[in-house]
Image (cartoon, helix red, strand yellow):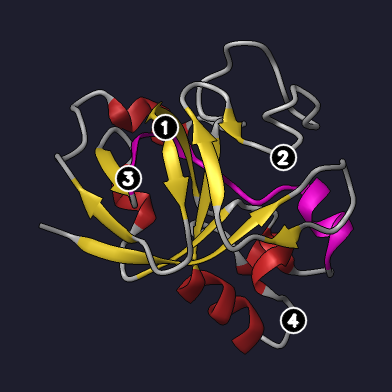
Amino acid sequence: MKQGHVEAIYIYPEEGKPGSAAERVNAVARRGLEGDRYFLGEGTFYRDDKEGQDLTLVDAEAIEAVRESGIPFDLGDSRRNVVTRGVALNDLVGARFMVGEVECLGVRLCHPCTWLESLTSPGVMKAMLNRGGLRARIVRGGQIAPGDKITVLDEPVADAALSASSSR
């Protein structure tokens, strides 16, 4: 069984504004993280009933690779909610997994975009290519905190490859 952990959590209450690190968040099924703009239906790419906007995750290792390429980039700069370590998020498209007590379903990859680059530094899109993170549905809500385990419950479903290639 694959397992990793939550390195950090970020909430982004306002479009285009820096996020804030959270010590604990409440994740609500089919809504998102309380306090985040997507939970409130105000995200840049928000649409009612759009799959994969409940929760976004990114590998801490991907953020470190961006830094190693010479681009200043902090954990919260990725604009993803949950920073993970020790689990390959790209492999979770179509898989069920737990983040602490929260059950999730990996919906599609979260590719870097020009919006992210406009809020950070030139070169971020290229540096994060194929490691921009994962968009997930919250199936069963609960609390998430740094240090929580991430446990893969099952392998991806067969038609997940379609979701992996789609964007936003």
Precedes in sequence: disc 4 or disc 2:
2
How dense is the environment of label 2, judged by Cα within 10 Å: few (below 14), some, or many (20 and up)? some
Q: Are marks 2 and 1 in contact (CB under 8 Å)?
A: no
Query: Is 74 or 31 nearer to us in this picture?
Result: 31
Q: Could you tell me how far apart the alpha carbons at marks 3 and 1 are, in whole angstroms?
A: 8 Å
Q: Are marks 4 and 2 in contact (CB under 8 Å)?
A: no
Precedes in sequence: disc 3 or disc 1:
3
Q: Label 2, secondary structure: give it.
A: loop
Q: Label 4, secondary structure: give it.
A: loop
What residue type is disc 1 on?
A: Gly
Position of 75 relative to 153 (above/below): below
Precedes in sequence: disc 4 or disc 1:
4
Residue 105 percent across, percent down from the top left: 34, 32
Q: Label 1: which residue?
A: 141
Position of 27 relative to 64 (above/below): above
Q: Are marks 3 and 1 in contact (CB under 8 Å)?
A: no
Q: Label 2: which residue?
A: 35
Q: Which mark is residue 101?
A: 3
Precedes in sequence: disc 2 or disc 1:
2
Left-right relation of 55 to 1: right
The image quarter in which residue 69 lies: bottom right
The image quarter in which residue 47 lies: top right
What residue type is disc 4 on?
A: Ile
Q: Could you tell me how far apart the alpha carbons at marks 3 and 2 are, in whole angstroms?
A: 19 Å
Q: Label 1, secondary structure: give it.
A: loop
Q: Label 3, secondary structure: give it.
A: loop
Q: Are marks 3 and 2 in contact (CB under 8 Å)?
A: no
In the image, the segment drawn in magenta is 101-120
